Image: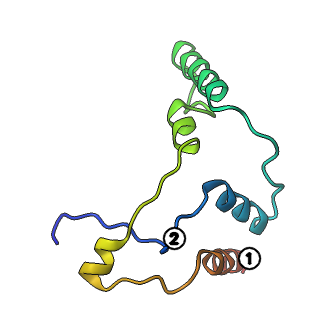
């Protein structure tokens, strides 16, 4: 088991944008409005990265090509190895985890 990485998660895939929406709701933030096609976002990120590099602006651009790629593709990770090697099973749902997290933040 030494040196192995394990994914810990739910038994079912989670839609990223629904999850982001739930986080925003719990945080009291407005929901995401509208959509930007990935190709347009990728081009914009390319321009921003170029400007930040050329003008030597501090920090990271507010949008990068990596961000666009990660936010425009589905990802699913299996916790089967953790279940097999450690007997891992999720104890609480994502919804309950968010509720607990934001309740803790409020205190």
Label drawn at residue 42: none
Expressed as whole percent of the image width and height from the top left, the position of residue 42 reads 59, 26
Label drawn at residue 106: 1
Label drawn at residue 12: 2
Numbered label tally:
2
Q: Nearer the viewer, residue 9 or 29?
A: 9
The secondary structure type at the circle numbered 2 is loop
The answer to whether 59 is drawn above or below residue 89 in the figure is above
Expressed as whole percent of the image width and height from the top left, the position of residue 48 reads 61, 22
Badge 1 density bin: few <14, some 14–19, many ≥20, Cα 10 Å: few
**Residue located 58% across and 44% down the image:** 71
Between the C-alphas of marks 1 and 2, the distance is 29 Å
**Residue located 71% across and 80% down the image:** 103
Mark sitting earlier along the chain (1/2):
2
The answer to whether 47 is drawn above or below residue 37 in the figure is above
| Side of 106 where 45 appears, left or right | left
């Amino acid at each position: 088991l030494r040196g192995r990485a394990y994914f810990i998660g739910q038994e079912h895939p989670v839609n990223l944008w629904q999850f982001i929406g739930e986080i925003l709701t719990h945080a009291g933030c407005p929901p995401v409005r509208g959509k930007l096609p990935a190709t347009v976002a990728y081009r914009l990120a390319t321009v921003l990265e170029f400007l930040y590099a050329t003008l030597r602006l501090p920090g990271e651009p507010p949008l990068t090509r990596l961000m666009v790629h990660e936010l425009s593709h589905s990802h699913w990770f299996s916790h089967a190895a953790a279940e097999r090697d450690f007997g891992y099973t999720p104890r609480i749902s994502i919804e309950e985890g968010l509720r607990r997290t934001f309740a803790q933040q409020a205190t």
